[in-house]
Image (cartoon, rainbow, N blue to C red):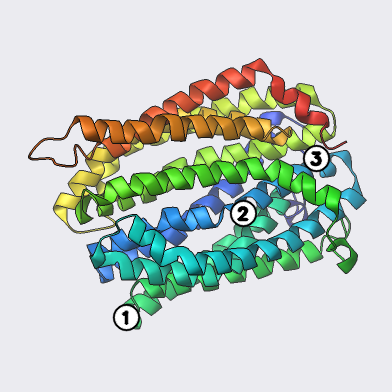
Amino acid sequence: MTLKQLFAPSDMTEGKPWEKILVFTIPMLIGNIAQQLYNTVDSIVVGRYVGDNALAAVGSASPILNLLLVLFMGISVGAGVMVSQYFGAKQRKELSTTIGNCVTLTAIATILIMIIGSLGIRPLLEILNTPESIIDWCTSYLMILLLGSAGVAYYNILCGILRGLGDSISALVYLLIATVINIALDIWFVAGFKMGVAGVALATVIAQAVSAVLCFIKLFRMKEIFEMGPRYLKVSPSHTMNIIRLGLPSGLTQAIFSMAMIVVQSLTNSFGELVIAANVIIMRVDGFAMMPNFSFGTAMTTYAGQNVGARRYDRVEQGTRQGTLIAVAISATITGLILIFGKYLMGIFTTTAELVTLSADMMKILAVGYIAMAVTQCLSGVMRGAGDTMTPMWISLITTVVIRVPLAYGISYATRTPQLPHGAYQCIWISLLVAWICGAVITWLFYMKGNWKKKALSLD
């Protein structure tokens, strides 16, 4: 394979399904790990150079940030599905219009997020009973990230487009460049200039802006596949509605998840700074452990989308079986590593022995859940790629709102004692494990039912 072919779009309608999926997934997995480094390096730097309270502040801000960014996530998913299907069907004009509309919609969404987020950050943190010791840090961290949200918005949208075209290598290279910039600026701003949590937020904004610019340059050079002229930036009602129709359920899914995280964060806050900081560390390690699942899920969306566009339904089911088996095997390996080396991983973030032990013990509760999430992500990815983005949304709604949140508060209430006035803090992670397992079972049942296949003609 030549260097030019390596950075070119990939046609996933031909060749061995497992090979196409794996080749597409590996660079995307590396890229997702690099992206996770953004938040992880933030946590390590503030934990080491500022303190455990600063670490808790960065973690407490994450669910709110994710909630405010759901518009971008929705556009990204809608774009990926449409781009993969139009690319598979070789419809150049429709592909160009879709990409142009995504660029315009992202600009509109960015402005809305900046206005709404800037006005609502502090009141929301107060509603969530964020401790006074960290609320100022949370506010400044979120404000900087939101005011610089154009970078993360366009990077995610444009990467979704590149992946829909089967090009996961370019997104990886640009992200690795941005990651190096982010790490260097993190250390410079925090350790050098003593800027605290504001420094890590500023470093992230600058790095993400660089990656977005690089993605734009790449797309402008892909004239042999689609056009990116001004006329395609004009909003097309039909294409915009399709992007929203396909992306809205995924955006709502993320919004539901983020709101549930915020509700659970309020419960977490009641246990004090130590448990808050432990939760931050666990979620950072969780981010890496979950990366293979998310990567295979996205790969399955692109794979299914291209083959649905080409009307190769036999390949969709064949690839689903092969891709899911590989994802499960990788997640099982990660689970074993977490159980064996968990305590060493936690020690990267803090030197506080009590915090390391608490984080490692709680991580063991979640470990087996990653195998269940491998099934959920792969099968949900196939359904989304075929155009059925509603079913994964409903499953997420059930597992998060109906199962996870009530279970967390229920265990907390049932375990209250004079010594534990807020109940057992383990409720936070036990409820998440149960939700993951239930989600895998429900997703498998809906996939086997097969209604997602009827959505395949939705873009005709």
Q: Is residue 149 above or below residue 333?
A: below
Amino acid carrying label 1: it is Lys
In the image: residue 380, left or right of residue 53: right
Foreground mark, 3 or 2?
2
In the rendered image, which residue does mark 1 sit on? 194
Residue 305 in the image: state x and y as whole percent: 75, 36
In the image: residue 349, left or right of residue 151: left
Q: Earlier in the sequence, mark 3 or mark 2?
A: 2
Residue in view at x 49 percent, y 51 percent: 33
Residue 380 in the image: state x and y as whole percent: 60, 32
Task: Decide which of 234, 290 is in the foreground and name it.
Answer: 234
Quarter of the image where the C terminus is located: top right
The image quarter containing residue 141 is bottom left
Secondary structure beneath dot 1 equals loop
In the rendered image, which residue does mark 2 sit on? 71
Task: Give the alpha-carbon distance from disc 1 to disc 3, as whole Å.
Answer: 49 Å
In the rendered image, which residue does mark 3 sit on? 85
Task: Give the alpha-carbon distance from disc 2 to disc 1, as whole Å.
Answer: 33 Å
In the image: residue 70, left or right of residue 273: right
Residue 107 in the image: state x and y as whole percent: 69, 66
Task: Decide which of 231, 413 is in the foreground and name it.
Answer: 413
Amino acid carrying label 2: it is Leu
In the image: residue 180, left or right of residue 308: left
Q: Earlier in the sequence, mark 2 or mark 1?
A: 2
